[in-house]
Amino acid sequence: MQYLDNHKRQADSTVIEVSNLRIADRIPLVVILGPTAVGKTEIAIQLAQSQKGEIISADSRLFYRGMDIGTAKPSRAERDGVPHHLIDIADVNENVSLAVFQAAAHQAIADVHQRGNLPFLVGGTGQYMRAVIDGWDIPKQEPDPALRLVLETWGRKLGAAEIHQRLAILDPQAAALIEPNNLRRTVRALEVIFHTGKRFSQQRQRGSSPYHTYQVGLIRPRTELYARIDARIAAMLQAGFVEEVRTLLEAGYHPDLPSMTAIGYRQIAAYLQGKLSLEEAVMLIKRLSRQFVRRQANWFKLDDPNIHWFQIEPGTLDVIADQIRMFSGILPSES
């Protein structure tokens, strides 16, 4: 709790002055991005090991303690091998807002750089990554509890997908970047729209980034990616995913908590509550995961000139490592 409180205060008060920074004065930051199950974790760990790097997680699912199997959280051995930051920073019933994450990520990156190491920002949560990379000036819009309650009640009555369609009418750009089943984010977008009279998508202004970035995008053929997603889900179930969700429910964490809206958790909770069969829950997880991959593409576009895309195949890791050495000013080591 103290960790989040510190960064809530920092999010409210800290402004990074970067408008006059030259590229040479900006902190070097390697970004590893791409769709779920593409292999970001494995690639990032190997790169960080070879580049004297530390990893800052930009995956919103990894914030929460006790949510390990269903989030494909890096193992303890992997985290012992390479320092990781912004993993297990909150309890399941806490909320890590975009502004809080941004402040915590800025601090973690600065700390890594100060230690003389190379920071790696790694993840697939596009909104969180862009807030850091692009230096978003996030408006300090205070929550409106009464309006939020009305919208949440409306959302539960109509269903998450139906209220998401209402958002798509008011703000198509915002709706395109929010999963249809994510009632919390849909409600937040509508709350800001109704409170301010402005589109939610217009209120996240791009600022000046304090970083000199090298952005690595990882891709695989879509059929291969879907096969990896299916294999990952099967491995999660074998590793005890159902029992992990059961433990969370027995601890009093409700399936409607923002953290529990992560793909897989709500569906397994529905199975445990007798609302779905396990087969139905697994099929739904696979379908939602594929939809999520397509939605991630809205954040990470193949024609983005700032992203260097690499298809993962034999030899790709060495090519990326050489590019990062050139970027960071480190010459390839002689064999």
Image (spheres, rainbow, N blue to C red):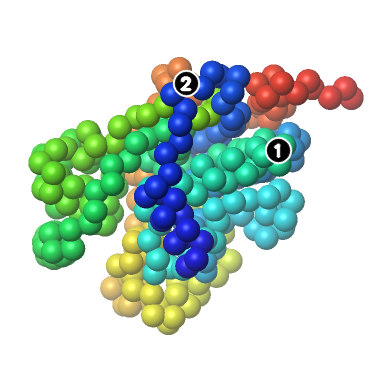
- The image shows residue 258, relative to residue 82, as above or below, that is below
Q: Quadrant of residue 268?
A: bottom left
State yes or no: discs 1 and 2 in contact (Cβ < 8 Å): no
Image height check: is 28 above or below 246? above
The quadrant of the image that shows the C terminus is top right
Residue 254 location (% of width, % of height): 34, 73
Residue in view at x 34 percent, y 61 percent: 258
Q: CA distance from mark 1 to mark 2?
A: 24 Å
Rendered image: mark on residue 117: 1
Q: Is residue 46 left or right of residue 3?
A: right
| Mark 1 or mark 2, whichever is nearer to me | 2
Q: Which residue is mark 2?
A: 20
Residue at (27, 52) in percent of width and height: 185
Question: Residue type at mark 2?
Answer: Asn
* Numbered tag placed on residue 34 in the rendering: none
* Disc 1 residue crowd, few under 14, some 14–19, many 20+, Cα 10 Å: some
Badge 2, how many Cα within 10 Å: few under 14, some, many 20+?
A: few
Labels 1 and 2: the sequence-earlier one: 2
State the SS at label 1.
Answer: loop
In the displayed structure, would residue 148 be above or below residue 176? below
- Give 81 or 294, whichever is nearer the viewer: 81
